[in-house]
Every structure is written in C-alpha cells, then in structure tokens.
C-alpha cells in the first residue's frame, strides 16, 4: 500500500498515513496528528509540513522534522519543530 503522507514522531519514527476520505485530511485529522492547533511549514511549492502551532516549550523537540525543515530552508537556522509533524503534498490539506 502506498502512503502519500508521513507522520514524523518526536522519537524519529516515521509512519505512512492516508486521509480517512482518501483524498485530503480534515482539520480534525491534522489536529490529532500534531496534538493541537496546526501551523503549516512550506517545504517546497508542493510539499508541506503540518506542525503544532503552540508546541514550542510544551512538546518535545522533533529532531527529524527539524532537520528536514532546515534542509529545505523552511525554518531559520536557530528554530526547531516541536511535537509530531505530518509531511505531505500540499493538495492533501485544504
């Protein structure tokens, strides 16, 4: 089975996930993945990372998601991603 999105956990585990409707994620699904309010980090014109908007200082840092975001120049060098992150094509989030 092919997965179009990857859930990146704070411990480095990555799991393929798909929207319940087969096309795009609902707000509730996204909030469940990141355990709270969402924010979007654009990795490229067609790929995004959904993160917890209020995660810094509350949730554990996510080293894997941070490295991916920094490699794409999506966050400042001193910044980091906290909590779980969902990486997916931008058209999977409306």
Image (cartoon, grey):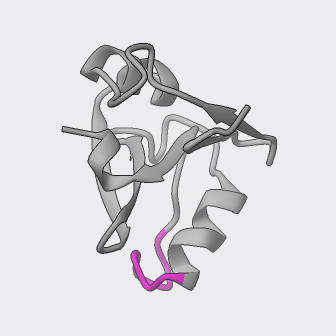
Where is residue 7 drawn, in percent x and y? 62, 39
Query: Can residue 53 be seen here?
Result: no
The N terminus lies in quadrant? top right
Q: Nearer the viewer, residue 83 or 47?
A: 47
Residue furthest left in the image? 94
**Residue under the image location 53 percent in, 28 percent down:** 18
> At 61% across and 59% down in the image, what residue appears?
65
Residue depicted at x 80% and y 48%: 12
Q: Is residue 68 above or below residue 16?
A: below
The part of the chain drawn in magenta is 72-79
In the image shown, does 83 or 91 lie closer to the viewer? 91
- Picture layout, residue 15 above or below residue 21: below
Secondary structure of the magenta portion, mostly?
Answer: loop
Q: Residue 16's image quarter?
A: top right
Q: Can residue 51 be seen at all in this image of the molecule?
A: yes
Residue 70 among those drawn in magenta: no
Where the C terminus falls, by quadrant? top left
> In the figure, is residue 5 to the left or right of 47?
right
| In this picture, residue 70 sits left or right of residue 64 | left
Residue 70 at x, y percent in the picture:
53, 79
Q: Residue at x 29, y 20 (%)?
A: 26
Residue 78 in the magenta stretch? The answer is yes
Q: Tell me residue 56's x, y (percent).
A: 45, 47
């Amino acid at each position: 089975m092919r997965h179009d999105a990857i859930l990146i956990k704070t411990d480095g585990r990555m799991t393929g996930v798909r929207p319940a409707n087969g096309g795009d994620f609902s707000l509730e699904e996204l909030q469940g993945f990141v355990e709270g309010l969402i924010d979007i980090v654009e990795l490229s014109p067609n790929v995004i990372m959904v993160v917890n908007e209020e995660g810094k200082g509350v949730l554990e840092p996510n080293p894997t998601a941070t490295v991916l975001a920094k490699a794409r120049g999506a966050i400042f060098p001193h910044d980091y991603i906290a909590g779980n992150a969902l990486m997916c094509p931008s058209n999977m989030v409306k």
